[in-house]
Image (spheres, rainbow, N blue to C red):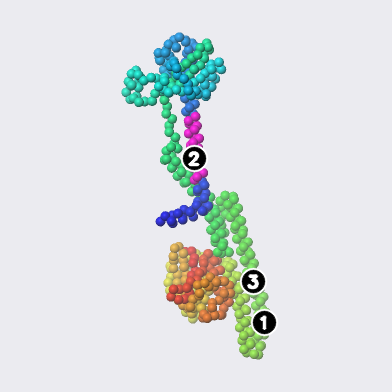
Amino acid sequence: MIIPVVARARNFFRSLVGRIFLLLTVGMTVAAVLALLVAEQARHLDFERWRLQRVVASAVDIAQRLSHDPARIEAMLEDQRIMGARTAPRGVALTDPNPALAQALESRFGPHSNPEAGQVPSGLCFAASKADPNNRAAGLIDTPRPDCWIVRFTDETGERRSLALYLPHLVKPPSNLAKPIYLLLILLSSAGLAIVVARFVSTPLRRLERAAEAFSVSVDPEEIPERGPEEVRAALSTFNLMQRRVRAGFAERTQLLAAISHDLQTPLTRLRLRLELVENEELRARLLQDHQAMLTLVREGLDLAASTEAQEDWSVIDIDSLLTSMAEDAQDLGAPVRFLAGCGGTVRVKPNALTRCVSNLVTNAVKYGGSADVSCARQGGRVLIEVRDHGPGIAPDQLDQMFEPFTRGAAGQPGGRPGTGIGLTIARSLALSFEASVRLANAPDGGLVATIDMRA
């Protein structure tokens, strides 16, 4: 169970879609995490800046009050009658002064003020006592004490002031990155967007891949619709142009071979007439046999070239009706051909190419195996047409070789010597024209099975 999943995952990440998916997922996740880190840092800086601004505002307020009525304000500070401020306790040292706060105070009080400031533990400013509100107010037990700031500066009169300013203790909210649910949401959203983008980007490439695959098995595939972004349309247009040029090259080759075949037929006809005049009957028979073999080579060579070009439109046909009709036609001509089983339904093919392909396989089966059994089946979204004979079969190491031009069966087989050896080559070329394949296999109980494998 695990091995197939791992294999599928490995194949997925080897594909373009998988690599784009992985790159975008990792990239967007890292970018989102970095953006959150920057936002957290900015929030922290804003929080600290706000606290310092509150301390500066409190210090400036007390300084202004002291400048207007120093005696009364000093007494109020001593008696803690000013909310949020008091005279700093004696002997409290600033072990960790805040340069940013001191600079902000200097900009407000002037360079002569020589300010120094910093946060100190709350216990140094507010000793626990029975009068402490935390010990008397319901619901305030164990609440955090206010933050305490010690501010020292020299006022306009030259007197050194020392204040203890306290602000409510504010706890900075925890970072979102510490919560796994946020990281999971970032990862899932990045992966979802990545797979959508990857499939969108790879769609034109898949169309081009399918077109290239169709072109590899047929020189007459349908052209690709030129849709999509400008670069994609340019690539598809170039591919279509390549297909048209290749088809033109095949057509030119076929015309050349047709012309050669036509020109050869005239001297071959004259040669036959002259061979008929040879008096020695045995020699005349051998010469006429060689002449016929030469004429057959010319004609079947032209058939081979024409089979690769196959300019024919696609059509939807009833496959069982076609095979039944071909078997009946062969029986009318005296050939031992039977149609055993059908597969039902229709298929989209090039009818003439399929007919010629099956006919060549049936002819070979009758020639080398003495008879032909034709059947059709559907398997895994494919249509399989089988043509079986009951002859001696072919050595397993020679099955693929039989599709090479001018390769014939062994001399010991029935009909092993006659023919040109390009019947299977033509059958394979015709099958490629409608995006199918032909393969040979020895039947378990004897004989050879030729299978046409095509899309359902």
Quadrant hosting residue 137: top left
Residue 318 image position (x, y, % from top left): 46, 68
User: Which residue bears the numbered disc 3?
Assistant: 257
Q: Indicate which disc, 1 or 3, sits on the residue closer to the N terminus.
A: 3
Q: Is residue 264 left or right of residue 133?
A: right
Residue 32 tag number: 2
Q: Which span is picked out in magenta?
A: 25-45
User: Which residue bears the numbered disc 1?
Assistant: 270
Q: Residue at x 61, y 73 (%)?
A: 302
Q: Indicate which disc, 2 or 1, sits on the residue closer to the N terminus.
A: 2
Crowding at label 2, few (<14), some or many (≥20) Cα neighbours within 10 Å?
some
Decide which of 213, 108 is in the foreground and name it. 108
- Alpha carbon separation for disc pair 2 and 1: 86 Å
**Which one is in front in this view, the residue at disc 3 or the one at disc 2?**
2
Q: Residue at x 44, y 63 (%)?
A: 380
Decide which of 410, 93 is in the foreground and name it. 93
Amino acid, disc 2: Ala
Q: Residue at x 44, y 16 (%)?
A: 90
Q: Is residue 325 visible?
A: no
Q: Is residue 432 left or right of residue 252?
A: left
Residue 100 image position (x, y, % from top left): 52, 24
Disc 2 on helix, strand or loop?
Answer: helix
- Alpha carbon separation for disc pair 3 and 2: 66 Å
Question: What secondary structure is the magenta-colored segment mainly?
Answer: helix
Residue 23 image position (x, y, % from top left): 52, 47
